[in-house]
Image (cartoon, rainbow, N blue to C red):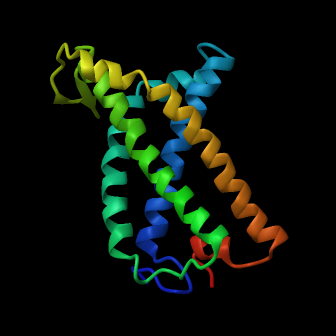
Amino acid sequence: MLKDSSRRYGSVTRGFHWLVALLIVLQLTSVYANMLWDGNAFSQAIITWHTSIGVSLLALMALRTLWALSQLQRRPVHDGRLQRLAVGGHVVMYLLLILMPLSGVLMTWGMGYGIHAFGQVVLAGADVAWATAIGQFHGTIAWVLTALIVGHVAMALHHHFARRDDTLRRMIGRS
C-alpha cells in the first residue's frame, strides 16, 4: 500500500521516514563522534559526504513535506491535547529538518565555498554576509533537532512498551 490509511502509514511515508532517519543519524553521529574523538575513522569517512548528504536531506524533506500534506486526510485522527502536542512536535521537527540542511547550504555558499554534491557543483560560491549569518544557526539547529529526535524515539518506545498501542507498528508497517 503506497498511501497512508487510518490504520497505518503507507510505504512512501515509511520510506521517507526511515531514509531521512538514517541520513540524519549518519550526519549527527559523525559530527558528535568527532567532537568526542577528533579525527576518528567513522567521522572522517562521513564528513567528506556531509554536504552531499545535507543537500539530499533538503531535497528529501521537500518531497516528504509535499507527500505528508497530500496524505493529511488519510492519516489517523489526532484528538485530544496530547495528540495535538505530538502533531505540533512533528511540525517543529519537519521545520528543523528543512532548516538544518538549508542553513548549512547557505553558510557554505555564503562563505564562498560553493555547494558540491556527489562530485558536482550545484551552486558556485559567493561572498554573501546574510547567508553566512543564517548559517551560524546550523549547529544550534542540530542540537535542538537532536533533543527532539531523542524525545521522538523515547515517545515511540513509550507507546510501544508502556502503552502497548500500535503507534510504532504503524511506522514499521504492521497493523
User: In the depicted view, which residue is nearer to us: 62 or 41?
Assistant: 62
**Image quarter hosting the C terminus:** bottom right
Task: Name which residue lies at 38% across and 37% down.
Answer: 101
Q: Is residue 52 left or right of residue 147?
A: left
Residue 42 position (above or below residue 65)? above
Q: Residue furthest right?
A: 162
Question: Where does the image place residue 71, in percent across and percent down from the top left?
Answer: 38, 76
Residue 115 position (above or below residue 35)? below
Question: Where does the image place residue 152, in percent across and percent down from the top left?
Answer: 64, 55
Task: Name which residue lies at 64% across and 41% down.
Answer: 147
Whether residue 136 is visible here, answered yes or no, is yes
Question: Where does the image place residue 164, in percent across and percent down from the top left?
Answer: 80, 76
User: In the depicted view, which residue is nearer to us: 59 or 81?
Assistant: 81
Task: Name which residue lies at 57% across and 68% down.
Answer: 84
Question: Where does the image place residue 91, in percent across and percent down from the top left?
Answer: 47, 57
Residue 150 position (above or below residue 6)? above
Q: Is residue 122 left or right of residue 79?
A: left
Q: Quarter of the image holding residue 58? A: top left
Q: Quarter of the image holding residue 39? A: top right
Task: Name which residue lies at 69% across and 78% down.
Answer: 166
Residue 85 position (above or below residue 8)? above
Whether residue 113 is visible here, answered yes or no, is no
Q: Residue furthest front?
A: 81
The tally of labels here is 0
Q: Is residue 107 left or right of residue 37?
A: left
**Image quarter hosting the N terminus:** bottom left
User: In the depicted view, which residue is nearer to us: 56 or 130?
Assistant: 130
